[in-house]
Amino acid sequence: MTDPTASGLPVGATSSNVPQRSNADILRLRKQLLNPTLSVSYNEPLKIVRGEGVWLYDQHGQAYLDMVNNVCHVGHCHPRVVAAGQAQMAQLNTNTRYLHDNIIEYALRLTATLPEPLSVVFLTNSGTEANDLALRLARAHTKVSGVVVVDHAYHGHSPSMVELSPYKFNGKGGAGQSSHVGVVAMPDIYRGPFRETSAAGRQYGQALPAAIESLHQRGIAPAAFYCESLLGCGGQIVLPEGYLREAYTAVRAAGGVCLADEVQVGFGRVGEHFWAFESQGVVPDIVTIGKPIGNGHPMGAVVTTPEIAASFVSGMEYFNTFGGNPVSCAIALAVLDVIADEQLQENARRVGAFLMEGLRELQQRHDCIGDVRGRGLFVGAELVRDPEARTPDQKRAKAVVEAMKARHVLLSTEGPDDNVLKIKPPIVFSQANAEEFLDKLDQVLRGS
């Protein structure tokens, strides 16, 4: 475990003059001053003051193994990423109406990781902005407005993206499905209608024509199909083989474009590939990118084809004040450098395989683990009351999260029934970290 004083600061200290308040005071002031819809993690919220690698530290210097952070992709406060941001911030930060090398270098480096013809980059400040802009691109190209999405998907928090996110519009406070949106079932081979068969991907993909037809019956044609390359809020679902090929064929036949939402799963997390959509053997028309791109620095991107980009040229400029600024691009370049130099994609593949094997061994000992699934370091363990009936066990999942926190391991839950342990640590996560996690999870499951 890393020494909590290794940064040179006393335990719990910060490098600013901000008053250090108690947890109770912070909670009281949050309630008084901040967005009233904000939630906190855990029954007893943590005050996290520092991060390093896979570790988060509270104000008392206690270290917690972070198993759920897919934003600080190459580790919390990676020194090379921090240094790149500091150096550029000390020199210049401005906007894209001035020429600068960083944005060009980043566009070259980013597009080099993607298949042809994905070669035109739009830089934003978040995954939501990226998905929102992608909708404008799709509509400009197709001249129609409909969108097909996967049930329980989440694509962002802007008004247009809430409308494309069943996770939101069918959830608490949601307004329900909009007329321009078609929804297809999650391709879940554990719990859905088509289960562990080689034909499942094709069978789930065959739902697209019906969703498109439902739009047509409302006088709407499909501009786009939005699909995460692995389903996050849906419960860490791995798309069955052939799903995207079948779905993309139907969407393109209807005149729509196909979007791969890589906001949660890109940049080598899945191990075998740099981008998760590659595991399906398809090339999308638009790729959206967010969370890990800046390792915690707010940044996002859309990458598309020259043809779609040309359709967006209408006389109205798309200018984003902060998108693609020199500091953001310096940080994003450092992230790419670290992934390559530290062989983190290979680490995600190797350690992810070890972690999955360990979880499957636990599944043999604990019948509350109904399913283990994932790719690389994007993993889900679904907890059930009855392994035969596959009855979701939300109560146990929540209890496991709290018990793991008591053992200084941070987890969360996901899925329509909130019974899937979501496991997506920074991709510097090591085999030793995985062993510690598996040992503690075994202890918790034996005691629960």
Image (spheres, helix red, strand yellow):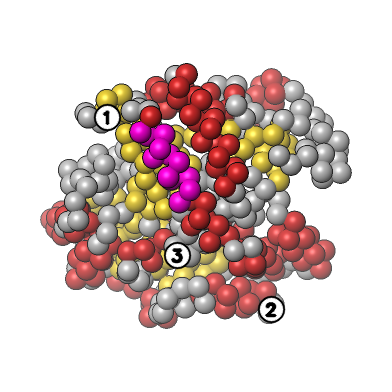
Q: Nearer the viewer, residue 116 or 280?
A: 280
Judged from the image, the secondary structure of the residue bearing numbered disc 2 is helix
Residue located beneath label 2 in the image:
101
Region in magenta: 353-364
**Which residue type does callout 2 highlight?**
Asp
Q: Position of residue 117 (x, y in %)?
A: 40, 79
Q: Position of residue 384 (x, y in %)?
A: 32, 28
Taking 78 as reference, is 140 left or right?
left
Q: What residue is rendered at 66% in x and 22% in y? A: 28
Characterize the local packing of mark 2: few (<14), some (14-19) or many (20 or more) Cα atoms within 10 angstroms: few
Q: Nearer the viewer, residue 252 or 221?
A: 252
Residue located beneath label 1 in the image:
387
Asked if the residues shown at circle 2 and circle 1 are in contact, with their CB atoms under 8 angstroms apart, the answer is no
Taking 243 as reference, is 284 left or right?
right
Of the 4 image quadrants, the one containing the N terminus is top right
Give the mark, 3 or 2, whose residue is nearer the N terminus.
2
The quarter of the picture where residue 417 lies is top left
Judged from the image, the secondary structure of the residue bearing numbered disc 1 is loop
* Total marks placed: 3
Q: Position of residue 234 (x, y in %)?
A: 35, 43
Q: Position of residue 267 (x, y in %)?
A: 52, 61
